[in-house]
Image (cartoon, grey):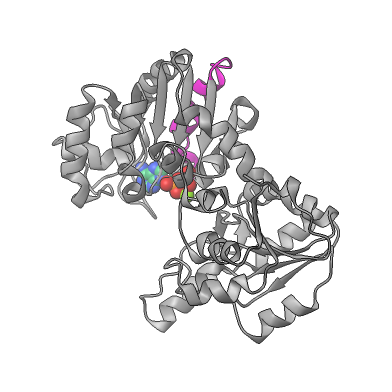
Amino acid sequence: MKTVRDLQVAGKKVVVRVDFNVPLKEGKIRDDNRIVQALPTIKELLNKGAKVILMSHLGKVKHKGTPEEVAMDKAKNNMAPVAVRLNELLGKDIVSFCPDTRGANLDFFVSNFKAGEVFLVQNTRYEKGEEKNDPELSKIWAAMADVYVMDAFGSAHRAHASTYGIPEILKSEGKEVAIGYLVEKEVNNLSRVVEVSDKDRPYIAILGGFKVSDKIKVIDSLLKKCDKILIGGAMAYTFKKALGQSIGISPCEDDQLEYAKRCFIEANGRIILPVDSVVTDGFEGWTKKVTTDSPDIPAGMEGMDIGPKTQKLFGDEIKKAKLVFWNGPMGVFEQNDFAAGTIAVCEAIAKIPHAFTVCGGGDSAAAVAQFGFMDKFSHVSTGGGASLEMIENDGHLPGIDIIR
Ligand code: ADP
Ligand code: MG
């Protein structure tokens, strides 16, 4: 695969698909790790005298809603603060921001910026056609580029217009496409959790977080590779309910209950679920907080974190591991009251320095950084869904395969 190292791009317009899908709260960036991770590729291109056009999605824009709802989603996921942060990180005042994703404004940027400058295009998901890999949209975007670089590892599992459509067109036109340094690093590190060698056993996977429907599908294939899977976060409740435990008002994917039950039975003791939980009387504005003494969650209560017995149970499994893959926080770690489970997993991993340990996912990586465990992991991946799918598909991801 060609990398950014191999490119000669002086004076050329290089479209770089980066992953700037950072956790945002009220327009403030909670963790800039994904921007930091994109810097080596951006700097390399600038050093080579390229004109750098950056594209990324940010959050979710639901185009099915009313015009007001769509406008609200767009406002919430405006890319502008990312451009400001990128400019600070590059420290040269060379980054500008195009608030549109097509039209006269974008055309003006494309024809007027110079070698050694960067501009960031507005959130690609402002376009309805992005997630559908709409050919007309891909054509508009591909027309901006002489060269395309894929450095958005966190989005490489999606065949969208900006991750797949653009390079597909450029390739058909005989133009150069390459991967960036971040994608190269991710692929090198993750290959160890994809193709597992015997010396790397026991291999423990830890799953959590909130995006259950995205992640639950991967369990089947994870079971083929891992020795054990520890499940915390919101996914645990779907499993609990499937096994007949009560889950109160905790989130649950009812259409996945059959699947979860089948996975659990087929796993034959290799899926480990929480045995206690920290629960509240609601997600927001809760007034009651209790730690349950059993796997059951009382009526009217919602699970927010794994409990202390589960921390110990998970910790004892992690202790034995030679290889760890972790995606998804164990609880609502953004609030101090529900951070203990996630911290306990970090601490357990910090105690096995000789194991190869990978944590992946936007929020998971943010948690690891926030609690000060960044240097305790062999690799902290910028991709959650992408790393999971890479494991599932034996190393293949559409956004990387199209570059090959
Ligand atoms: P990642 O970005 O690492 O792939 P996700 O996006 O799937 O992870 O999930 C992260 C989110 O999951 C966090 O914002 C966290 O608050 C939330 N979460 C974890 N456990 C729970 C829970 N029990 N109930 C609700 N949300 C949870
Ligand atoms: Mg996330």
The answer to which quarter of the image holds residue 66 is bottom left
- x then y, percent, for residue 336: 50, 40
Picture mark count: 0
Screen quadrant of the N terminus: top right
Q: Nearer the viewer, residue 236 or 151?
A: 151
Relative depth, front residue between 348 and 224: 224
| Left or right placement of residue 149 versus residue 212 in this view | right
339 falls in the magenta region: yes
Q: Is residue 285 magenta?
A: no
The one of 49 and 213 positioned closer to us in this rendering: 49
Position above or below: 284 against 311 = below
User: Is residue 40 shown to the viewer in this render?
Assistant: no
Q: Give the range drawn in magenta.
A: 335-355
Can the viewer see residue 105?
Answer: yes
| Residue name at image x 46 percent, y 58 percent | 159
Q: Which residue is drawn at 80% across and 78% down?
A: 112
Query: Where is residue 268 shown, x and y percent of the image?
Result: 21, 22
Q: In which quadrant of the rendered view does residue 280 lie?
A: top left
Predominant secondary structure, magenta span:
helix
Relative depth, front residue between 83 and 398:
398
Q: Where is residue 52 in the image (x, y as percent from the top left)?
A: 74, 63
